[in-house]
Amino acid sequence: MQTTANAVAAMADDIIDLTPKERMIRKAKSHLGFQFGAFIVISFALIAIFAPLFAPHDPYVQDLAKRLVPPVWAEGGSWEHILGTDHLGRDYLSRLIYGARVSMGVGFGAATLGCIIGVTIGLVAGYLGGRVDQAASFLLTCQLALPSLLLAMALVFFVGSSVTTLIVVLGVLHWQYYMVVTRTLTRQIRSLEYVSAARSIGSNDRQVLFYEILPNLFNQIIVVFSLEMAVVIIHEASLSFLGVGVQPPTASWGLMIAEAKTMMYFKPYLVVIPGAALFLLVLAVNLLGDGIRDITAPESRN
Amino acid sequence: MLKFILKRLALGLAVAFTVSLATFLMLNLAADPASMVAGEDATQEAIEQIRVQYGFDRPLYVRFFEWIGQLVTGDFGDSYYWKQPVFDLLIDRAPVTLTLAAGALTVTVVLGLTLGVLAALKPNGWLDRFALSFGTAAQAVPNFWFGLILIILLGVTFPIFPVSGDSTWMHFVLPCFVLGTSAVPQVLRLTRTGMIEVLGSDYIRTARAKGFRPRQILFRHALRNALLPIVSVITIQIGYKLGGSVITESVFALNGLGRLAYESILGADIPTVQMLVFFFALVFIILSILGDILNAWLDPRMRVE
């Protein structure tokens, strides 16, 4: 049924002759993964930005009289603390909401920094070719050989753990895929006719790179961005879990799991909840990236 | 072929040198090594004393070439934190990590190849959908959290496996599974794409027409060619497994290189940390050279740049 419907839709497309934008919207409307991913990512982003509005309690206020209150669905839970409280009596839901700030902030910041580095190297290498390209490939081979998680751990800890350090270190260590994608595409595009046309009317290299080539890489870069953001979010959580990332009392999902680790046998939900949030966010970011790739892929005409 | 191998070796050597330089600079410039070794409450005097005692007062390039000298001669210097030769530490801890990496790689290859082949048999069928969904989900699960959940479920609720330590092979089952599944999605997708492409090719149709049994076609004709790109992915994965051992070994309290790296970082033990970073990078470099050579041997087209 589905294939028949698709075939009919494709035929209709040809008759009506939709603009590329309309085509994309149509594809987006039928792409479940994209919709789910976009919904979750936008929700988490809003929650992160407006955390003080969403959080029912102050995530840092300790109440030792109310330690380890179970969540509302368990015996002894109440609507006062929907997800219960942690070992210091802090409201778990509020900490979870503030934790979204760290994950989203580090994920977005580090992915942006990596993007700037990788796209710049990729553009220059792909456009100039020759020696410069060889040097860039060599740099790439070296970066790929480095154990990035281990190096990130050491650098963050040595420099001094903070959100800024995490963003800079993770960003500097995650530019490879941007570079590979940008370089390959730039090499393909630079020999196209419209680029020669731009050059023949007197555009210089900088103009060609920024106004002719870069805008055409946008879709693919966004896809890499989402995949890298997912990786960086997991790395931040891992580092915080091991105690070399975000420092207490800041709420980070990795740190919450680390703090709950000693109690995981009799209070497993303290480990399950922040991990589930992490899983959901990373899954959504990946689905969003896959979705954008599917939607922006040029129409294959049979 | 010999020329190809020599070229790859020269490139590997250059990469190894650059990586050692980058590692050395990053780790030694990230913080003042003397005050890190001295600890937080140390007086300025104590810091200066350590600076002279450990030789941190000498220029950076002198210390770098001293380290290169250590790398070449195999005398890796002494650890500040463990108070013993770094070389002995590496030899002590390596077997656990190698066992973990080998086990994890087996899990990755077996699960990834099986699911990939099954998915490719009927693209868009229910098995294919299941495999792809599994891949997407597995990619989103944080390793350390997955480890903890397995410890709660299989170590405590249904106590089947020991969850901490490395004394028997049973101790390695959960860590290998955790570290192994994280790489399944990549191998799965690559196998699936490769198999779909190969199964649709002319020579497979010819083989079918000639009346070979499906099983024979699948394993003898199709899989062999689909495996080519997977060889290089697997060599890269071994490198990642070593790096990923930091987390898995900490969660399951395995006394391997990853845990050594973690404890050395916390102990501000720069000689051990930089040796481990370089060692993991070197293993990666050697494996990718071997992967290239293996690929060139399997497929002569790869020998041409």
Image: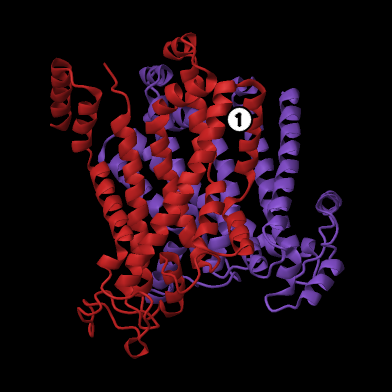
- Position of B56 with respect to B260 (left or right) is right
Q: Is residue B224 visible?
A: no
- Position of B273 with respect to B205 (left or right) is right
**Residue with the mark numbered 1:** B295
* Residue at the spot 23% in from the left edge and 44% down from the top edge: A35
Give the letter of the purple chain.
B
For the N terminus of chain B, the quadrant is: top right
Q: Nearer the viewer, residue B120 or A257?
A: A257
For the C terminus of chain B, the quadrant is: top right
Q: Nearer the viewer, residue A116 or B79?
A: A116
Query: Can you give x and y, in whole percent of width and height, for residue A277 in the image?
Result: 33, 61
| Chain ID of residue with mark 1 | B
Q: Secondary structure at mark 1?
A: helix
Above or below, A149 against B78 in this view is above
Q: Quadrant of residue B249?
A: bottom right
- Position of A70 with respect to B15 (left or right) is left
- Under mark 1, the amino acid is Asn
Above or below, B118 against A129 in this view is below
Q: Is residue A107 visible?
A: yes
Q: Nearer the viewer, residue B112 or A28?
A: A28
Mark 1 closeness class: few <14, some 14–19, many ≥20 residues within 10 Å = some
Q: Nearer the viewer, residue B282 or B28?
A: B28
Q: Quadrant of residue A50?
A: bottom left
Q: Colour of chain A?
A: red
Query: Can you give x and y, in whole percent of width and height, for residue A8 in the image?
Result: 13, 23
